[in-house]
């Protein structure tokens, strides 16, 4: 695995060379910000482990170093060194000066970011992100480099002992390279409606669309009002037109009412349909739970979200007399988010990998049902594994990268966290996707990964991990880039609309000796808490009673998946490490 990913990293960087002029013009880094303090701890079972001159890893001196030493067979022991930066930052590149004995691998060395004492759940094996200095005078010396888009103020380097010999590591320094604030180009943002028309059908003097022009453009505060008096046998429709014909994209329509509690029942007679010119795409839909998203902070507002695979340049919103909206239907805005699917793929089956790939071409294009299957059988060589790369038609920088994955044999959270590396190669090097998994509430073996990119990239790579005990499998259904939603700074008499933060689950401490505290912005009320082991077997289940949970004393130490399923059947999963 180590050699494969390093080789892929070199290949990807070579492929990105034509982008360097573009990158230079768009990514201007500020000065280095070095770690300003450190702490370390050695587990009790690591009897012959030690850290010498740990303070040398702090500050701008890149010549002196801290020495970390672990003795063989101190199984269960470890050393953790925490390097703390002056302040909390986001969207940075981290560079760590590092050296090791090349006769032994970097297996057992990991790096992870924290915001205070709360893990970002982004632990990465150092062997996958170590860049070797090619100078003959610096054998084993190089840098650990990775990017992060989560808030953090410290990094933790974790060292676990090997089986055969004493291992020594040298840590020279750690610094951040702070990036400028993101300025998303218009070509990679949402596209708002540019014109509209409306009409009434039936006999209804008081039916109308008031202030219809308010649904046009980026102002998301003012609104058009579609209104049908109760008892009228009529319908009102508003035709919202976009500047250009699009094919694969998402349409989002902001709606609202003056009644508390927007719901499908309240909107039972509201429909939506796309057109290419005056020709219908025959995709008429009554608003249902699948396409209606209720506002997280304001239940009188919501969004209608539909995806299209047919060419269209307008969408028709229709209000019929069956709708019981006394105050009418408010239409705030409508916009498109371009969706670009992976257009080609390459895959690799190294000699002796004991692996296979079935139907690799199925991961390409807009068909989200069929899939490419990566199978990794029992394999003692960590450097020979099945891998696949999905390439997009062109370079994009600021996108939402969405990947559809599943497994035939086990919960997808287990596969994502333990059995595959998913990597995006950008200007700053590889970014390992370690969060953003949304499990299908109806099928725990299926889910989507959503990740916001901030550097130029053209592909996403999948590499199965070594397995010593059982076969691993991953189904890749699709991968697409979607334009980033970036609300326009339009002022009006009303307050600016706030975009709800993405819901996340965090927990601490992690690793834990048996007690964890849940945190995050999800609704824990009436939630179900359950824990699976690495084989997918459920070992604990309970209704939510308090944010602090005592794990069963019968659970042995190891890696587990803790999941929270809300009363709305949304599932959030986090890896926990139990030490006994």
Image (cartoon, grey):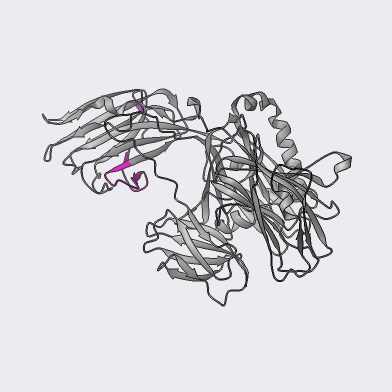
Q: Which residues are magenta?
A: 276-302
* Direction from residue 139 to residue 52 in the image, left or right: left
Quarter where residue 473 is shown: bottom right
543 vs 323: above or below: below
Q: Position of residue 280 (x, y in %)?
A: 35, 29
Q: Position of residue 377 (x, y in %)?
A: 71, 58
* Direction from residue 36 to residue 196 in the image, left or right: left
122 vs 538: above or below: above
Q: Is residue 63 visible?
A: yes
| Nearer to the camera, 106 or 235 | 106
Question: Measuring 52% from the left and 32% from the top, which residue is drawn there?
Answer: 182
Number of numbered discs overlaid on the protein picture: 0
The main secondary structure of the magenta stretch is loop
Q: Position of residue 193 (x, y in %)?
A: 36, 26
Residue 280 part of the magenta segment: yes
State which quarter of the image contains the C terminus.
bottom right
| Nearer to the camera, 62 or 213 | 62
22 vs 270: above or below: above
* Direction from residue 509 to residue 41 in the image, left or right: right
Quarter where residue 148 is shown: top right
Q: Position of residue 121 (x, y in %)?
A: 57, 54
Q: Is residue 371 visible?
A: no
Quarter where residue 292 is shown: top left
Residue 431 part of the magenta segment: no
Question: Measuring 27% from the left and 27% from the top, which residue is drawn there?
Answer: 214
């Amino acid at each position: 695995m180590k050699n494969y990913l390093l080789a892929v990293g070199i290949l990807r960087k070579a492929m990105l060379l034509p982008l360097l002029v573009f990158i230079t013009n768009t990514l201007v880094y500020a000065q280095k910000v070095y770690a300003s303090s450190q702490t370390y701890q050695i587990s009790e079972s690591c009897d012959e482990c030690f850290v010498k001159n740990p303070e040398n890893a702090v500050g701008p001196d890149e010549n002196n170093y801290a020495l970390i030493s672990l003795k063989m067979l101190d199984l269960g022991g470890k050393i953790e060194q925490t390097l703390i930066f002056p302040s909390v930052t986001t969207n940075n590149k981290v560079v760590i000066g590092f050296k090791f004995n090349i006769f032994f691998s970097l297996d057992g060395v990991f790096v992870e970011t924290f915001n205070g004492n709360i893990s970002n759940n982004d632990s990465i094996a150092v062997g996958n992100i170590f860049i070797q200095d090619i100078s003959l005078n610096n054998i084993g010396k190089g840098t650990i480099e990775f990017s992060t888009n989560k808030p953090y103020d410290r990094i933790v380097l974790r060292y676990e002992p090997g089986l055969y010999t004493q291992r020594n590591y040298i840590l020279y320094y750690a610094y951040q390279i702070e990036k400028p604030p993101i300025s998303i180009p218009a070509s990679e943002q949402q596209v708002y409606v540019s014109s509209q028309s409306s009409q009434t059908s039936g006999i209804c003097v008081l039916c109308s669309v008031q202030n219809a022009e308010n649904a046009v453009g980026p102002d998301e505060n003012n609104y058009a009002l579609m209104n049908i008096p109760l008892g009228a046998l009529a319908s009102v429709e508003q035709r919202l037109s976009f500047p250009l014909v699009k094919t694969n994209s998402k349409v989002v329509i902001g709606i609202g009412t003056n009644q508390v509690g927007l719901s499908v029942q309240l909107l039972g007679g509201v429909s939506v349909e796309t057109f290419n010119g005056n020709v219908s795409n025959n995709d008429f839909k009554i608003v249902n739970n699948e396409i209606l998203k209720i506002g997280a902070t304001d239940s009188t507002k919501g969004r209608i979200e539909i995806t299209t695979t047919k060419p269209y340049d307008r969408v028709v919103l229709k209000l019929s007399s069956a709708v019981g909206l006394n105050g009418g239907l408010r239409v705030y805005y409508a916009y498109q988010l371009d969706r670009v699917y992976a257009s080609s793929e390459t895959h690799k089956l190294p000699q002796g990998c004991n692996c296979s790939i079935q139907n690799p071409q199925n991961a390409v294009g807009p068909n989200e049902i069929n899939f490419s299957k990566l199978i990794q059988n029992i394999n003692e060589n960590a450097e020979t594994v099945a891998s696949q790369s999905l390439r997009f038609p062109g370079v994009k920088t600021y996108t939402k990268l969405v990947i559809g994955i599943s497994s035939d044999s086990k919960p997808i959270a287990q596969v994502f966290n333990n059995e595959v590396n998913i990597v995006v190669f950008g200007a700053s090097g590889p970014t390992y996707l370690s969060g953003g998994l949304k499990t299908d509430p109806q099928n725990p073996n299926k889910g989507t990964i959503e990740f916001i990119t901030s550097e130029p990239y053209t592909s996403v790579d999948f590499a199965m991990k070594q397995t010593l005990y059982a076969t691993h499998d991953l189904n890749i259904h699709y991968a697409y880039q979607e334009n980033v939603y970036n609300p326009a700074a339009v002022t009006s008499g009303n307050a600016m609309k706030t975009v709800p933060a993405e819901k996340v689950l965090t927990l601490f401490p992690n690793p834990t000796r048996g007690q964890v505290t849940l945190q995050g912005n999800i609704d824990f009320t009436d939630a179900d808490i359950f824990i699976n082991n690495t084989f997918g077997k459920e070992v604990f289940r309970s209704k939510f009673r308090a944010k602090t949970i005592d794990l069963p004393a019968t659970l042995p130490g190891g890696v587990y998946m803790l999941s929270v399923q809300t009363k709305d059947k949304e599932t959030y999963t986090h890896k926990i490490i139990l030490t006994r």
